[in-house]
């Protein structure tokens, strides 16, 4: 079995996956959402301390399997440096103690693999990656080369939900909070402008939309629950339609037979519904990760580990460094 370790942001997670049939033998995640909630976002120093406590606690539970672990796959890029270092340090210690090889995993590749947790990957594939740190449209060819078709020039999609929730005095993370608030509203009361509407550039930008929300909140002063719900509804609609506008341009120019949506914000049902409609229109199969594995988790890291193990793509203890920022080139 392969051990997966994930600690790139505010989730500490370990998973054990059987290499021959992708069976998930152990999975646990300790989320730090509650601790960061009162600050309205992730506090790096607090995240580091919480990882240091949580990771060994989960590790204790997999001790009985130690002899059966073939390799350790760990997220080393991209992410918060102080968080990445917790998982990487634990992976290195274990690798020395158990005398087994290390595998480095790119967190974004991990999210893509969340579509194929229990089976072989299927290519070619179009992907929308929407998380707290990234917003990207990707095209992956049969040879696993990744072309980035669109990125955000400022905030990411998930991050904009977090910031809007914070502005309304709601906790972190904001994605589910906003989605739930929006359910109590059904009229587009605020009619926020969709970013880059009519602009041919295939890129994303959420900071202008965030500012429109800020102005609306300032005008209202004290917010009632209905105000919050109406803001959430109009914001979610504008943010998702922005995602869809640019995807429509891409779909017009590319023929995808499969299109996957991954990352924490891919759990958003309004976005999923819009994507389903687009895929239906173009006769393309929409691929989704199980809801439980949309957000950060070690199962997707162990899954990448299985494929890299089969290709003997190991990394030396001395060469395994954290890379808070990194490029995506190959799956
Ligand atoms: O992939 P992830 O767990 O962490 C990163 O790699 O960044 O994504 C977390 C992000 C947060 O910004 C969170 O607010 C957002 O995903 N998110 C959502 C929803 N659930 C989580 N955004 C919109 N709607 C949701 N239902
Ligand atoms: Zn993530």
Image (cartoon, grey):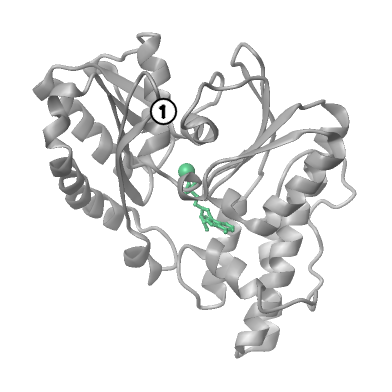
Residue at (63, 80) in percent of width and height: 228
Could you say where residue 160 lies in the image, as x and y percent from the top left? 60, 59
Could you say where residue 204 lies in the image, as x and y percent from the top left? 71, 46
Could you say where residue 319 lies in the image, as x and y percent from the top left? 28, 17
Q: Nearer the viewer, residue 10 or 66?
A: 66
- Total count of labels: 1
Residue at (65, 57) in percent of width and height: 269
Determine if residue 323 is in view. no
Query: Does 106 sit left or right of 149 as displayed?
Result: left
Relative to residue 1, is residue 78 depicted above or below? Answer: below
Could you say where residue 300 lies in the image, as x and y percent from the top left? 43, 34
Residue at (66, 86) in percent of width and height: 226
Query: Does 189 sit left or right of 101 as displayed?
Result: right
Outermost residue on the left side: it is: 97
Q: Quadrant of residue 324?
A: top left
What quarter of the picture does the N terminus occupy? top left
Which residue was labeled with disc 1?
A: 303
Q: Nearer the viewer, residue 293 or 224?
A: 293
């Amino acid at each position: 079995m392969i051990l997966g370790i994930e600690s790139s942001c505010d989730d500490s997670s370990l998973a054990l996956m059987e290499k021959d049939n992708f069976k998930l033998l152990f999975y646990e995640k300790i989320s730090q959402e509650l601790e960061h909630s009162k600050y309205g976002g992730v506090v790096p120093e607090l995240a580091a301390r919480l990882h240091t406590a949580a990771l060994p606690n989960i590790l204790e539970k997999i001790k009985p399997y130690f002899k059966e672990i073939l390799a350790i796959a760990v997220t080393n890029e991209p992410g918060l440096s102080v968080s990445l270092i917790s998982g990487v340090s634990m992976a290195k210690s274990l690798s020395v103690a158990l005398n087994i090889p290390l595998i480095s995993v790119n967190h974004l590749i991990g999210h893509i693999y969340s579509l194929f947790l229990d089976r072989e990957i299927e290519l070619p594939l179009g992907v929308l990656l929407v998380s707290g740190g990234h917003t990207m449209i990707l095209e992956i060819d049969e040879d696993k080369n990744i072309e980035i078709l669109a990125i955000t020039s400022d905030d990411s999609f998930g991050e904009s939900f977090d910031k809007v929730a914070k502005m309304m005095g709601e906790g972190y993370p904001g994605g589910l909070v906003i989605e739930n608030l929006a359910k109590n509203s059904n009229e587009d009361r605020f009619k926020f402008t969709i970013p880059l509407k009519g602009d041919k550039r295939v890129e994303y930008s959420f900071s202008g939309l965030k500012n429109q929300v800020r102005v609306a909140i300032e005008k209202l002063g004290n917010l009632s629950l209905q105000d919050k719900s109406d803001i959430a509804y109009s914001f979610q609609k504008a943010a998702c339609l922005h995602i869809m506008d640019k995807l429509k341009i891409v779909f017009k120019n590319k023929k995808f037979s499969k299109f996957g949506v991954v990352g924490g914000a891919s759990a958003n049902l309004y976005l999923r519904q819009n994507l389903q409609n687009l895929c239906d229109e173009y006769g393309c199969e929409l691929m989704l990760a199980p809801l439980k594995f949309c957000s950060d988790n070690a199962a997707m890291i162990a899954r990448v580990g299985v494929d890299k193990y089969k290709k003997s793509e190991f990394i030396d203890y001395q060469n395994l460094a954290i890379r808070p920022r990194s490029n995506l080139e190959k799956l």
